[in-house]
């Protein structure tokens, strides 16, 4: 089984592209639980909220593994929640780094226009760049395999599709 996690700053096309590719490959897609939490409980996050979000995200990821499908797409994972912890609180609890990691991360560059959707935080250029840098730093620190996805929407889709196809062999 190959798990591919869409990772990076807000508004870079992760959720939309994950949905498109999950349909194309007919594989499970684990949605971003943090978005669900934000839409239902609001965006006044505490560290306890982030820890609870990571736990539920992990539970959903484990459920998607049932039946051992050859490919599972993850719209996010607890490693991205760790990036949120760093951005919001300046620290990352060890619990957020201890979760199981995907076999491949697709790091989405913040080089497309940012659109506010009611749950996003970091739209200013400097904050968006910082969030992207934190997300990439976490990939490096944890030693996971990742590919950077950038360019316009068509280039992103083509690069993500190629990276996933290569991971599948």
Image (cartoon, rainbow, N blue to C red):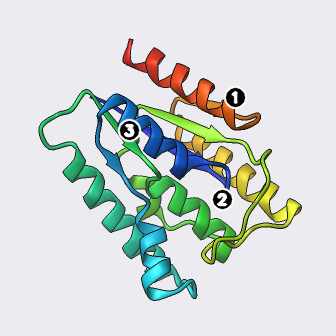
Give the residue furthest to the top: 169
At x 43% / y 84%, what residue is drawn? Answer: 40
Per the image, the residue denoted by label 3 is 22
> Nearer the N terminus, badge 1 or badge 2?
2
Per the image, the residue denoted by label 2 is 10
> Nearer the N terminus, badge 3 or badge 1?
3
At x 57% / y 83%, what residue is drawn? Answer: 43
At x 23% / y 47%, what residue is drawn? Answer: 64
Q: CA distance from mark 3 to mark 1?
A: 18 Å
> Nearer the N terminus, badge 3 or badge 2?
2
Query: Quick check: 43 above or below 156?
Result: below
Crowd class of label 3 (few under 14; some 14 to 19; many from 20; radius 10 Å) = some
Viewer-side residue, 41 vs 103: 41
The disc placed on residue 155 is: 1
Viewer-side residue, 26 vs 47: 26
User: Could you tell me which secondary element the residue under label 1 belongs to?
Assistant: helix
Where residue 100 appears, as percent x and y from the top left, is 35, 46
Of marks 3 and 2, the one in the foreground: 3
Where residue 32 appears, as percent x and y from the top left, is 44, 60
Viewer-side residue, 117 vs 87: 117
């Amino acid at each position: 089984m190959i798990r591919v996690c869409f990772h990076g700053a807000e508004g870079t096309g992760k959720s939309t592209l994950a949905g498109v590719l999950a349909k194309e490959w007919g594989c499970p897609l684990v949605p971003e639980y943090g978005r669900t939490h934000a839409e239902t409980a609001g965006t006044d996050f505490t560290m306890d909220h982030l820890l609870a979000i990571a736990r539920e995200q992990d539970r959903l990821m484990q459920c998607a593994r049932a039946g051992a499908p050859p490919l599972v797409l993850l719209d996010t994972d607890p490693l991205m929640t760790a990036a949120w912890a760093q951005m919001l609180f300046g620290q990352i609890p060890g619990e957020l780094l201890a979760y199981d990691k995907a076999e491949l991360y697709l790091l989405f560059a913040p080089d497309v226009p940012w659109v506010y959707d009611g749950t996003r935080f970091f739209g200013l250029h400097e904050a968006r760049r910082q969030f992207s840098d934190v997300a990439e730093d976490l990939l490096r620190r944890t030693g996971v395999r990742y590919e950077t996805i950038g360019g316009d929407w068509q280039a992103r889709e083509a690069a993500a599709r190629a990276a996933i196809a290569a991971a599948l062999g």
